[in-house]
Image (cartoon, rainbow, N blue to C red):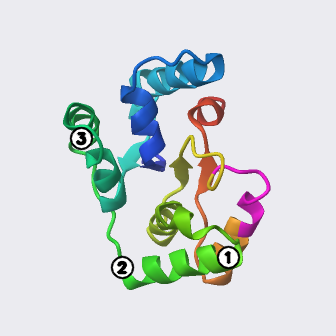
Amino acid sequence: MKPSLYVETTIIGYLTSRVSNLLVAAANQQITRDWWDGHRGDFDLFISRFVVDECAAGDSEGASERLEKIKGIPHLNVTEEVMRLADALLAKVPLPTKAEIDALHVAVAAVSGIQYLLTWNCKHIANASLRPRIESVCRDLGFEPPCICTPQEIMEI
């Protein structure tokens, strides 16, 4: 059985966007493509309706490309438990109100028992100072948090 992995929206964004002029962003885009092409088959991938909604936003050409990339990836259920955990993350981590979708990504992965959450969102999700608080809130509510990581980190596992 393969490890389970939740693909957060920033992964799809980096995968489908034009190569950045910024060196670090361009490197992260290439790392994402390398992971997608060479390592995603090592995992059972999952997304949620939140990923679909975010991928569908924006210009129609870009949205179409993003939606094509996630086609066929199973969706996790959004339950009352997911909503309660997301509310707790917003209140206790604390995350700003604008990070509600980020809390929902973490919550749906944790409630669903997903092992890894893959993201490039290092402000509100893959943040070294927030990660222990995110994990604590998940555990306090009875859920094992996913291992939050970037494509670069997961390729080193």
Instruction: Tell me the residue at 54%/64% (across/down).
Output: 98
Highlighted range, magenta: 126-133
- Name the residue beneath numbered marker 3: 67
Horizontal arrangement in the rendering, residue 67 relative to residue 54 (left or right)? left
Horizontal arrangement in the rendering, residue 120 relative to residue 70 (left or right)? right
**Magenta: main secondary structure:** loop
Q: Secondary structure at mark 3?
A: helix
Q: Earlier in the sequence, mark 3 or mark 1?
A: 3
Horizontal and vertical percent position of residue 54: 34, 51
Is residue 120 found inside the magenta-colored segment of the image? no
- Name the residue beneath numbered marker 2: 79
Q: What amino acid is at disc 3?
A: Leu
Query: How many C-alpha atoms fall within 10 Å of the one at disc 3: few (<14), some, or many (≥20)?
Result: some
- Name the residue beneath numbered marker 1: 137
Considering depth in this image, is 124 or 106 the residue closer to the camera?
124
Horizontal and vertical percent position of residue 118: 53, 45
**Tag 2 and tag 1, C-beta contact below 8 Å:** no
Query: How many C-alpha atoms fall within 10 Å of the one at disc 2: few (<14), some, or many (≥20)?
Result: few
Instruction: Tell me the residue at 31%/45% (across/down).
Output: 55
**Tag 3 and tag 1, C-beta contact below 8 Å:** no
Numbered disc in front, either 3 or 1: 3
Instruction: Tell me the residue at 62%/30% (across/down).
Output: 152
The answer to whether residue 15 is visible is yes
